[in-house]
Amino acid sequence: MKYREEYMNVSVVVAVVVAVLFISGPASAQDWTEYQNIQDGFKVNFPGQPRITESKWTSEFGFVLPARVYTGERGKERYTVTVVDYAPIRGLAEEKVKKCAPGAEPCFGSQLSGPSYWKHDVRGAILYGTSKFLERNAKITRLHWSHQDLVEGHQLQLTNADGSRTFAFVGMHDMKLYIVEGTVPAGAPEPGLFQQSLGWVDKAGNGIRYQTIYANQFNGLGDAPGTRGGGRGRGAGTPQ
């Protein structure tokens, strides 16, 4: 009888543990959701709904551009997507030319560079965004060319002064610069769920998947056509 009671007690404990795991598993998974933003043309997994902050970004050539920062937190983990809209840069450059003295350096330009070098500013936006990480009090442990859903960019890994690690991607799509970074405490796993989920959506909310590498310095400036395919609601070979 005593053996039977002990067996029943162990069974109850096991059942409780299983029930807790069953409940906590889905609950933990529900912390992460695919967030989609049509206005800024991206989708990514966030721990809940991100906080959105309006901001400004000063480009390499001094143009002040509108930006938005999407922030999510999970314990000591922090996830951000900064989106900088480079679409207004041409108009800003043309206005700048109107105000400069004849022959002044900002007036210089060509079909290749655009007035006030706005096209070169766009071409260098990914590199400029990447350079901002080099200014941090952190050690760069990895920096290489990469792509997210075939949109090219730079991927970085940093170890921060407090031992935490930051994993980042800097890319550009449809004249928008994306700075995507996930920071986790020392010893924590890489934020793979966040890193690998970045994708692109069109103005109708359909997912975009390119058939070849998209490079904004060519595709975004119209020097080469983009080729989309495989997205929801899009047929292969749809031109950008």
Image: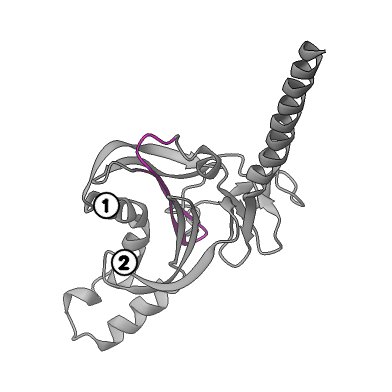
Q: Between 201 and 104, which is closer to the camera in this rendering?
A: 201
Q: Which mark is residue 88?
A: none
First in sequence, mark 2 or 1: give its number.
2
219 vs 53, nearest the viewer: 53
The magenta stretch is: 165-188
Q: CA distance from mark 2 to mark 1?
A: 12 Å
Image quadrant occupied by the C terminus = bottom right
- Secondary structure of the residue carrying numbered label 2: loop
Q: Amino acid at mark 2?
A: Ser
- Residue 49, quarter of picture: bottom right
Q: Is residue 221 above or below residue 208?
A: below
Q: Main secondary structure of the magenta part?
A: strand
Which image quarter holds the N terminus?
top right
Residue 132 image offset from top left, x and y in percent: 27, 55
Question: Residue 198: x, y in percent?
Answer: 55, 47
Residue lying at 17% horizontally and 74% vertically, measured from the top left: 105
Measured as percent of width and height from the top left, residue 92 is found at: 37, 78
Place residue 120 in its image quadrant: bottom left
In the rendered structure, the answer to whether residue 236 lies left or right of residue 222 reads right
User: Residue type at mark 1?
Assistant: Ser
List the single residue furthest toward the front.
Answer: 1
User: Does residue 112 show up?
Assistant: no
**Mark 1 = which residue?**
131
Q: Which numbered disc, 2 or 1, marks the residue closer to the eye?
A: 1
Give the residue pinned by disc 2.
Answer: 59
The answer to whether residue 102 shows anywhere in this view is yes
Identify the residue shown where x is 74% and y is 17%.
Answer: 6
Residue 170 falls inside the magenta stretch: yes
Is residue 178 located in the magenta-colored stretch of the structure? yes
Expressed as whole percent of the image width and height from the top left, the position of residue 119 reads 36, 63
